[in-house]
Image: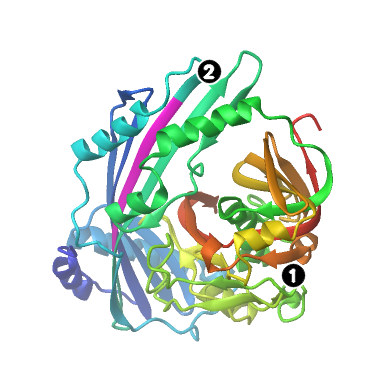
Amino acid sequence: MFDSTTPLRQRFAALRSGGEFFSLRHVRQSQQHLSVRKNVAEPPSLGRDEGAMLTVRVSGVEAYAATADLSQAGLQQALDRAEALARQIAAHALLDLRDQPVASHRADYLSPNLDAAFPSLADCYELLNQESASVPADPRLVNWQASLGLSEVEQIYFNSAGAELRQAQRFVFPGFSVTAFDGSDSQTRTLGRENFGQQGGFDVIQRCGLVGAGARVADQALQLLLAPNTPSGVRDLLLMPDQMMLQIHESIGHPLELDRILGDERNYAGTSFVKASDFGHLQYGSRLLNVTFDPEIREELASYGHDDDGTPATRQFLIRDGVLERPLGGALSQFRSGLDGVANSRACGWNRAPIDRMANLNVEPGDQSLEQLIGGIEQGILMRTNRSWSIDDARNKFQFGCEWGQLIEHGELKGVVKNPNYRGISAGFWRNLCAVGDASTFQVLGTPNCGKGEPNQVVRVGHASPACVFSQIDVFGGDA
């Protein structure tokens, strides 16, 4: 671990620049993806990537260049390219960054259980084979797959102000899916789609429910095949955490990204219905809605000590008692807007510049058990596990579909329904939040594939949430 620190430190110390500030961010990552489909092991997908980003500030103008050549000459050439670019664009610069503070911290950050050896490739395949083989022999079960993704990332950041920040992290993504088909309809049930990912080791697999998933997920797929379609109409909606994470992601996370609010993403990923003037005033949700940027839940996917610009990461409320307080904006966007943000300037790798990204974005628990949530609903529906999503460019009007639904009548959970969907307007939807589950309903989840930026960047995002109830929501089935 961190075996490249000393040579990189020596090479960084030997770099020469005419700028007032420069930095180096080195990233080394390896990835593997294993899967067993219908009891047949598929070839592993393995990858490795390493390089560095050099950033320089010249007369208040910043530019950067990346390289996979980590020799002294390679790093110096990249720094020279960045400096030449900064001088070239100076006449067109919109910002003078001479007064923007820079990091000077020295710290390490490690994923939990990083010192514990992860199971071998053979052991992982054995686990996946066991779960695949546990799927019952039923002709209606036409496809199933057990999978396991693993990513290990080591990052080292130096700058000319004396900062030295090192992070070593391991990300684990277990998965299981089963598709049932009866000749006219097909239904797929998963272990949370791609929504279960955490930092850690084998403990992640133990927590996620992969062990024993085969028979359980197959049974749920068959139940969906036999279930009636979801009825259409206005009902109370109970969203479980693995659907809440999609709701949080699309209708809170992306709208609150400050660079999007400032207009940077409008030609690609869109804008936001939120305005800079809304912070401190907008009633984003009901008084039950409390949302935090929280990099301190160790197993969550986007927990870290400092962001990729070196800003220390601390827990902050974005929405408190339903009122919008602060955006998801890193140091540069804060400097541009004058708004307080968070440490969420992040890049997907060594050859991308950090931009404002969601990180760990969580809904805080309330005070009701799952039984109390269900018991308070006269006519409603429970939905789990996202399978489709659509939302407009301003992240306002949305329509989401789920894998699993169950009717709720007179405070009791009733039969399974298939093809559950719901629609709404972001802020209006959150203002209809009428009950929030307690810590017993809280689950830490996350996705490995949030995309944004030009050139595109795909990053890991964490979302933790309790179960939540929303009143009077437009729900509909597959025929609507």
SS for tag 1?
loop
Q: Main secondary structure of the magenta part?
A: strand
- In depth, the one of 437 and 41 nearer the eye is 437
> Three-letter amino acid code at disc 2?
Arg
Identify residue for label 1.
284
Disc 2 vs disc 1: Cβ atoms closer than 8 Å?
no
Q: Secondary structure at mark 2?
A: loop
User: Quarter of the image containing the C terminus?
Assistant: top right
Residue type marked 1: Tyr
Q: Which residue is mark 2?
A: 140
The residue nearer to you, when weighing 348 against 97, is 348
- The structure's colour scheme is rainbow
Residue 149 on the magenta span: yes
* Residue depicted at 48% across the width and 35% down the height: 217
Q: Residue at x 31, y 34 (%)?
A: 128
* Front residue (pair 167, 112): 112
Highlighted magenta segment, given as a residue range: 144-155
Depth check: give the residue in front, 240 or 51: 240
What percent of the width, then of the height, locates residue 355? 51, 63
| Rendering coords of residue 275 (x, y %) | 74, 70
Asked if residue 294 is among those painted magenta in the image, a careful observer would answer no
Q: Is residue 408 above or below residue 437?
A: above
Query: What residue occupies the far right of the structure in this picture?
Result: 233
**Residue 352 position within the rendered picture, expressed as x and y whole percent measured from the top left:** 42, 56
Q: Does 287 sit above or below residue 32?
A: below
Q: Is residue 5 left or right of residue 374?
A: left
Q: Is residue 449 left or right of residue 225?
A: left
The answer to which quarter of the image holds residue 1 is bottom left
How many residues crowd mark 1 within 10 Å: few (<14), some (14–19), many (20+)?
A: many
For residue 262, side relative to residue 189 (left or right): right
Q: Is residue 200 visible?
A: yes
Counting residues from the start of the chain, the first of labels 2 and 1 encountered is 2
